[in-house]
């Protein structure tokens, strides 16, 4: 049972990494947005594999919406959203590759050599998890949860304020 | 060493590295935001793996993931707001052209 679970976690992990690579490999902006959607969906499936059902479903739902909006923005802003011109939209490539590799190796070294302590023997079932999370959100972590809500509201107002067209006053 | 954690932690590390590459190498603002999304996704995988393997009885781990999802949504909203303002001002969201903002 554990090995089947490990197989699915590894499979969806590989899929998430593969689609993340595709995001920056394709010339088409639309394909980039879709590859990111597939990568995030694979992550959601990975969460479900790790028995975090609520987070997995939430991840898939949120990312499907977010990436659809991103794809619309791609069409709005890009000269060539289909990638037919195969234009290169990168700079400082060498530095970026080195920084990415260094970050990857550093995190892997920590993951391999750190002592993470004893593994838990069992995970609560989905219904129990939701109940515990609800009690956590409305109990000990309520201030953090409220702060997150307020942050979203602030971001919505800020984004609208930045994006709205400035009023041109006619002084005549 | 805890081999059970490896698939998730290596996935998180790979997404983090690819995200760093994307955030540094892309000239387009929307593509750059995709890199940041991947960095945050890497953090989320690690959080869920730690919750699942080490502290499944503590819902604070799941709570932390919800906060990271909030950060992702906020980053996208503000990023797109800036993109619209920039597109309206100069008709492009290329970041190399944003060097003029230095003054």
Image (tube, coloured by chain):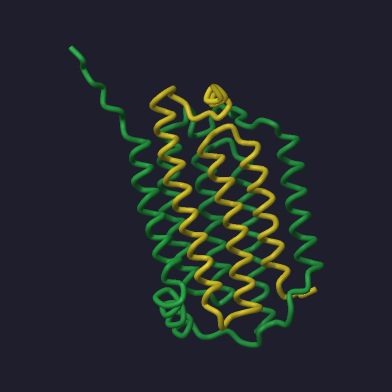
Chain colours: A green, B yellow
In-front residue for pair B28/A80: B28
Q: Residue at x 44, y 36 (%)?
A: B82
Left or right side of A41 for A113: right
Where residue A137 sits: x, y (%)?
Answer: 43, 74
Q: Quadrant of the N terminus of chain B?
A: bottom right
Percent position (x, y) of residue A135? 42, 80
User: Looking at the image, which residue is at 77% across and 55% down?
Assistant: A106
What is the x, y in percent for residue B46? 64, 65
Farthest residue in the bottom direction? A121
Q: Residue at x 46, y 58 (%)?
A: B70
Quarter of the picture containing the C terminus of chain B is top right
Q: Is residue A42 left or right of residue B74?
A: right
Up-down relation of residue A141 to residue B13 (above or below): below
Question: Which x, y percent locates residue B93?
Answer: 49, 30
Q: Is residue B61 left or right of residue A135?
A: right
Residue most extreme to the left: A172
């Amino acid at each position: 049972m554990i090995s089947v679970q490990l197989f699915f976690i590894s499979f969806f992990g590989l899929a998430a990494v593969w689609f993340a690579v595709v995001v920056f490999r394709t010339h088409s902006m639309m394909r980039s947005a879709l590859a990111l959607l597939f990568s995030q969906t694979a992550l959601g499936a990975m969460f479900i594999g790790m028995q975090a059902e609520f987070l997995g479903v939430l991840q898939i739902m949120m990312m499907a919406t977010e990436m659809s909006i991103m794809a619309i923005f791609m069409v709005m802003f890009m000269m060539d959203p289909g990638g037919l011109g195969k234009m290169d939209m990168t700079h400082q490539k060498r530095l970026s590759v080195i920084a990415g590799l260094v970050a990857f190796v550093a995190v892997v070294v920590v993951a391999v050599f750190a002592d993470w302590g004893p593994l838990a023997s069992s995970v609560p079932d989905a219904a129990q998890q939701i109940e515990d999370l609800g009690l956590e959100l409305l109990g000990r972590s309520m201030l953090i949860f409220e702060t997150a809500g307020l942050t979203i509201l602030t971001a919505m107002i800020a984004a609208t304020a930045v994006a709205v067209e400035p009023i041109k006053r006619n002084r005549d | 060493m805890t081999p059970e954690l490896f698939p998730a932690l290596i996935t998180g590390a790979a997404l983090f590295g690819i995200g760093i590459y994307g955030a540094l190498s892309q000239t387009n603002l929307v593509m750059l935001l995709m890199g940041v999304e991947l960095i945050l996704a890497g953090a989320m995988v690690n959080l869920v793996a730690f919750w699942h393997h080490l502290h499944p009885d503590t819902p604070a781990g799941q709570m932390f993931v919800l906060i990271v999802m909030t950060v992702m949504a906020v980053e996208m909203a503000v990023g797109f707001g800036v993109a619209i303002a920039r597109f309206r001002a100069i008709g492009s969201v290329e970041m190399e052209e944003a060097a003029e903002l230095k003054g």
